[in-house]
Structures are given as C-alpha cells and as structure tokens.
Amino acid sequence: LAQQLAAQALDVTLPGRGQCPGSLHPITLAWERIEQIFNSMGFDVADGPEIETDWYNFTALNNPPNHPARSMQDTFYVDIQDEHGQPLALRTHTSPMQIRYALAHAQKLLTETTKEKEIRIIAPGRTYRVDSDATHSPMFHQFEGLWLGDAVSFTDLKSVFLNFCTAFFETDALTLRFRPSYFPFTEPSAEIDIQFSSGPLAGRWLEVAGSGQVHPIVIQNMGLDPESTIGFAFGTGIDRLAMLRYGVSDLRQFFENDVRFLQAFA
C-alpha cells in the first residue's frame, strides 16, 4: 500500500493548468462600452432591420435618385423587392434606424407637454458596403447618434462627442477638430478628427466621424416640423474606434477568427 501511495503521489505545489477561458469579442467590448457611455448621457438605443427599403436607406435621408451610393458598386442589393417594386438592400449605414425611431415617436414628441420634448438615441449595428482593405470591410459595425429638440445646437454636438471620446479612450489628453464637409442628410456638415497628445498616435489627426445639423428635409421625413425641431446627428465606425482603443492596425484581424489574436482581449 505504501508503494502504491508513493507511486500515485501528486505534487500539489506544481502550478495548475491554464483554463483558457473565453471572452467577449473586442468589437462586442467596444459596442457595449459605447452603449454604456451614451446611456449615462440619457440616450436610448434604437434597433432596426439589416435589410432595408430604398426609402429608408436613401430617399428619407435626402439622397437623390442619381446619388453614387445607390449604385451596385457601393451597395449590396438582394433579389427581393418591396411592396412598391423597389429592390431591397443591405443597409449601408444605421441612419434608417433614426428615421424609423423618429417616425414611431413623432406623435409623442409633437404632443408632449413637458419642457424637454426630445429624441435622443444612438443606433448601433452591422452595416454593409462593397469595400474591402486593411481599413474597410464589406461588413462593418457602425453607430450613429441623433438628438432632436427645439434648441439643440452644434455646441451640443461638440460637447457630447468630446465627452464620449474622453470616456471611451479613458483620457483627457485628446483634441477634436471639426472640418467642414458635405453629407446629404445634414447641413451644415463636418468631419470629426481626433488627436491624442500622448501614446503611439500622438500628434496625428485621425478622422473618426461625420456629423452635422440634421437637414430640414430629413426632419420632415421623420414626421416632424423642421420649423420647430432642430438637432444634430453623427456617425462613426465601432470597428474604427476599437482599432484606435486597442492599437490594432489591420481591421481584418477582427474577423479572421485567430484565437491567438482574440486571446489578447481575454
């Protein structure tokens, strides 16, 4: 018996085997962080279909019929038509969710008796475009923000986005720059660049978002009165923000299912 015990003895001082637990994908981590930050600022989260009609994806957002974004070189169309005979497409942005949410809540906004008659949402989700390289993917994750009311200004946009960036990147050592630009659904419009004052990206201006005051035509398509409703919208890529936060240089690494890469975020 003594010999058997000696042969089967275990050294309890040896280190245990690693369990290699699973973890959330880095895109999911960034997505959840974005929602938490905007929830803390009073924004709701909107959701909507990934297969959209031409009206929600283009027309309602003031995209004219001859806009290049409607071409098959930029948009994935599916072999299905809506009730008006128009082809359906994989949404190219999450802006249609803004239209759907606003239409569903327009009557409440128009009849609300409280002082703060507002729509304040973010719309995160998967989007699709015909594009693929180190910084673009045919499927990518985007989130957009919308704040409508009777006195929402560009100053509010700058304040909200700066507060978000400060919380998301966990640093005050950053600067935002708003460059005049053009988008059919906002007027005036601006590209948003970010510059970090420390770290590996210090001193470089990096484009992170598009933004602007919501175009009156878009507000009208939301079922609201553009004479009494004003606000801002912005859109940015969750993948792009995750690349900056985690120091990833190639977007494709997020979708190659390389366990060695993903374990770095466990």
Image: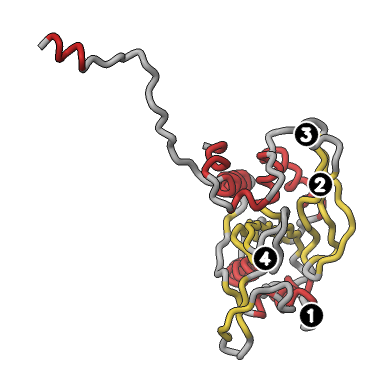
Q: What amino acid type is highlighted by mark number 3?
A: Pro
Q: Secondary structure at mark 4?
A: loop
The local crowd at label 2, few if under 14, some if 14 to 19, many if 20 or more residues have their Cα within 10 Å, is: some
Type of amino acid at the residue the image marks with label 4: His
Colour scheme: secondary structure
Would residue 189 be seen by someone viewing this image from the given angle?
yes
Closest to the observer, 160 or 171: 171
Mark 4, residue position: 93
Between disc 4 and disc 2, the foreground one is: 2
Location of mark 3 (residue): 200
- Residue type for callout 1: Pro
**Within the image, what quadrant is residue 147 found in?**
bottom right
x and y percent of residue 21 in the render? 43, 37
Residue 91 in percent (x, y) is at: 63, 70
Disc 4 and disc 1: Cα gap in Å?
16 Å
Residue designated by label 2: 206
Check disc 1 and report its element: helix, strand or loop: loop
- Dot 4 or dot 1, earlier in sequence: 1
How many C-alpha atoms fall within 10 Å of the one at disc 3: few (<14), some, or many (≥20)?
A: few
Residue at numbered disc 1: 64
Q: Earlier in the sequence, mark 1 or mark 2?
A: 1
- Residue at the bottom extreme? 85
Query: Looking at the rendering, which quadrant does residue 247 occupy?
Result: top right
Contact check, label 4 and label 2, Cβ < 8 Å: no
